[in-house]
Amino acid sequence: MAAPQTPDEIRDVNTRYHTGAAAAYDAKWGIDWGMIGRDQVLTKIEKALGGPLPHFGRSLEIGAGTGYFSLHMLMAGVIDEATCTDISPGMIEALQGNADQLGLEVRTEVCDAEALPFEDESFDLVLGHAVLHHIPDLDQAFGEFFRVLKPGGVVIFAGEPSRNGDRIAQLPKRAATTAAPLWRAALRAAPATVGDSDGGAHNHDLEQHVDVHAFVPSELEAITDGAGFEEVHVRGEELLANWFGWTNRALEATAAPEDVPMFWRQYAFRGYLALQKVDRSLLEGRLPATIFYNLLLSARRPG
């Protein structure tokens, strides 16, 4: 298909892709609903804020997907009430299923981040994970985030791709693709069928069109400042863990999922967690945010 050109076309592709990917999304990304997943979420929020984790009353998640952030925050008691939005009906359906299984109450809405169906000054926290890079008009979206936040409310976004970090990450991805035939032979794994983890071949073709931004910190800061926020901070997250993770993910993507053995999955998962700790203790906060793969943003609406 041709690359989407207009904001409406970008929204349409994102809606169709994420709806098609919803059923397999948690499995594809290794979403954990136990303590490991909860620690991942809370640590990212703490790092975005640059300090201890506060308590929030009403939260609004943008592009909530299957609920990874909001549901873990509810279980941890960090928020009292969660409203979750996504442009994809399929993702909202999957989120509601996860909430029901976990025994959690959550309000859900299918809507566009640039036109939120909520009253002014309704929330104490607006958050999102890996969503800003899908939104065509970020100035409009941040205006909406500002509008629905109460005075003194906080906005937090995590998992946004760094432009330079993404370029650096291409090196391990290319190396893994080159090594993939030997790796599959060693594991006796058959080649993957196109679309195995994306909801089919058609949905796989859509994936290349859903990302419309990669950021440098100054760009995120300027957009947030321009919407009227203060105390704007952009931090970098994951360097070694990212290289390791993308190497393994690129290898796994070439193999039939049922042929990737559990010992490999455990090695990849535990190695990623171990290198996250190395990044956190030795690299994050010491190296420029722009070289990390993920960017974390926090800001506050003036009180």
Image: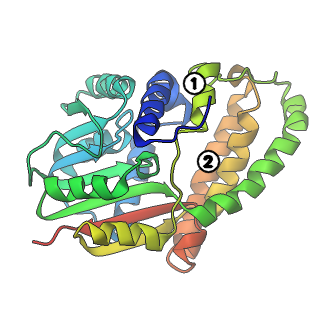
Question: Which one is nearer the viewer's eye here, 276 or 12?
Answer: 12
Q: Is residue 294 above or below residue 228?
A: above
Camera sees residue 201: yes
At 56% from the left and 21% from the top, the residue drawn is 199
Residue type at the position of mark 1: Asn
Mark 1 sits on what residue? 203
Q: Judging from the image, what secondary structure is the residue with disc 1 in? A: helix
Residue 42 visible to the viewer: no
Report the residue at 30% width, 72% height from top. Answer: 225
Of the two numbered discs 1 and 2 on the same chain, state the one appearing first in sequence: 1
Q: Is residue 38 left or right of residue 145?
A: right
Q: Residue at x 47, y 54 (%)?
A: 159
**Residue type beneath disc 2:** Arg
Residue 262 position within the rendered picture, expressed as x and y whole percent measured from the top left = 68, 30
Where residue 254 appears, as percent x and y from the top left, is 76, 31
Residue bearing the label numbered 2:
270
Graded by Cα atoms within 10 Å as few (under 14), some (14 to 19) or many (20 or more), the crowding at tag 2 reads few
